[in-house]
Amino acid sequence: MDDRYLQLQWRMTLSGLAVTLIPLWLLGAAIYLYFASAVEQDQRSQLRALALNRSAAIQLFLDERVSTLEVLAHTASPDDLSAPGELRNVLDILNESQHSFVDLGIIDANGEHLAYEGPYSLEGRNYGGEPWFEETLERGVHISDVFLGFRGVPHFVIAIRREDRPEPWILRATIDSEVFIRLVRSGQVGLTGDAYIVNRAGLFQTPPRFGGSILEQAPFNTNIAPPGVNVVFRETPKSGRVMSAFAWVTSKDWLLVIDRDPAEPAVPLKQTLRIELIALIATSLLVGGAVIFHTRQLVTRLAAEDENRVKTEAQLAHSARLVSLGRMAAGVAHEINNPLAVIGELAGLMEDLIDPEFIKNTKHGELFSDNVRKIQHHVDRTREITHRLLGFARRMEPQHDNVSINEVAREALSFIESEAAFRQIELVQELDRDLPIIKSDQAQLQQVILNLLNNALDASAPEGRVTVTTTADPDNVTVEVSDNGSGIPDDLKDRIFDPFFTTKGPGEGSGLGLSICYTITKGLGGSLTFDSEVGEGTTFRVSLPRIQE
Amino acid sequence: MSIRLLVVDDEVDFLESIVMRIELRGFQTHGVTSGTAALEHLEANPDSVDIVLLDIKMPGMDGLEALRRIKTSFPEIEVIVVTGHGSQEYNRLGRELGAFDYLIKPIRLDTILERIEAAYRSRYPGSDD
């Protein structure tokens, strides 16, 4: 294939690949993104649910403890509770069911411990002025933020103030951090997840797993957490990008934060991506392969058809030329007939008017008489030529006679017998005795065979041989005329059947013979072929169908 | 037999020569150079012609038209077309229009005379010479 087709193939392949692969990959990307987004949505809702759930649990925890202490504060008097061992009892009872109290304390309005039960020696401490103390006096029920206090250990308290005595008194309980922290930590998910509480000011109320300790400043502003439960993406200095659920605890201005690494539960996502990539690549290879293959097929076919078309057009042009040539020839032949007829008639008249006396008495009388006859002879010859010319031009309707090819061959041979003898060329007949009769045009066939015989004679040298053979097979009857003469050179073989093509000198042959034979044979439904070797000879083969369609 | 002929051809040299030659052979012959003249002659001299030799390509009235008219008006006259125009189509047309034969020039006079005698015999069977 030449350049143009290669270019076309290249362009078509590229556009074919683009049209098939780009949408495929776009679709793949879209599906993946959609899937990733769905996974993220899923994570978000899970995280949200978790945060909701955990914050509710924390809420419940706090509410239960507050409630328990309130009941205690309302049902017992400070005197009762201050009785030796009483607070111990109460603490034990409380811890039996609620496992979260470190100590209990009765504190008077001045901040003095009236009674204390717990692991720390806080009996003598005074809480007057402490933030939690003031808050409790004011509010009545108070859950404190985490603080170090006198014990020097981070903790938070729940305090109830009662005013059933002349002086208010406070029941205070310290909540077990361990228990609370464990509760908070239950919101942790996965290897890199974290759950902790910060207060409004951003101070850790429980220790985060990474990036900080209790009572340190969290590296974000709690303003980013809207009221209620929300899930956001945020950048953290230590863990990079995290998905965080923020849940405000309602009874205390605390923010539960649950962080998780969005990439972490990405295993299914990564797997999906891998599978999708493999599928996309496999499909792309298949599709790409198909596109390339089919494009090449298409372009090859196109090139072949174009070539065919060019050839056909050339043939048509050639045929058209032949037709116009034929018409021209016919026109010329017709024109020639009239003056030729005049010549013939005038010569004929001259012959009629010559009498023996004239011949005797005129010098060159004999010559005169002979010449007049010769003029008529040559008029006859010319007539033959123009008739053959007209035969070429005419599209003849073949006759449907019963023809014996053998007869035709024998007759044709008889016409050239004397010529062959004169030139010392041997004539050989090899006629199949059982050659079937076919339906054809006897006259035209004879014309063809005669023409081939004449050519064979012309190609032969003295002592040469011309052979006529007839054979039959189930489909065709064939007559061959071969000579052992000069042969046809390879470069001339293509032009043998062209009209006016001749190897003879001017005046020796018109070059119409073979092209007429070709046309006649084709018109009779047969074929005219030849084999030739230079120096060995030529065989022309006329094949005619036995059964006419 | 004395066959009476009319030769129609616009080529004067041809016409004069053939008329003379035919007369030399003993046939009564008249020559005209157009189809119109032929019809005029036939109308003016009824029953004076047995066979017509008719050319096709002539100026004025076309030979085929002349043929048609002659065969229509004088059906007893046999017409032999003698023309330089040898196409299959004209051949067929000529015969359809009633020509006895269609001969292509150049042609030997003897052949023409053969066909004239055949035409005469077909018209008057039993007459021999």
Image (cartoon, helix red, strand yellow):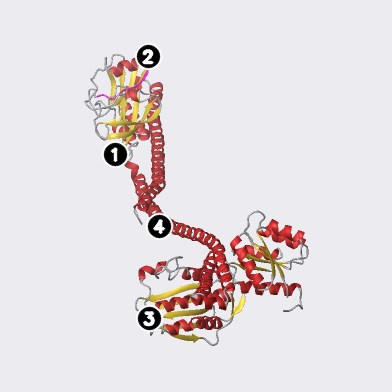
Q: Earlier in the sequence, mark 1 or mark 3?
A: 1
Residue occupied by mark 2: A165
Amino acid type of the residue that numbered disc 2 sits on in the rendered structure = Arg
Q: Earlier in the sequence, mark 1 or mark 4?
A: 1
Residue B50 visible? The answer is yes
Mark 3 crowdedness (10 Å alpha carbons): few <14, some 14-19, many ≥20: some
Using residue A170 as the reference point, say whether residue A358 is left or right of it.
right
Residue A306 picture quarter = bottom left
Q: Which residues are magenta?
A: A138-147
Badges 4 and 2, same chain: yes
Give the x, y percent position of residue A116: 28, 24
Amino acid type of the residue that numbered disc 3 sits on in the rendered structure = Ala
Picture residue at 64% right of the left edge, 67% below the top: B19
Q: Is residue A292 magenta?
A: no
Amino acid type of the residue that numbered disc 1 sits on in the rendered structure = Thr
Residue occupied by mark 4: A300
Residue occupied by mark 3: A461
Given this view, does label 1 or label 3 mark the residue nearer the observer?
Answer: 3
- Disc 2 to disc 3, how far (Cα)? 159 Å
Residue A174 visible? The answer is no
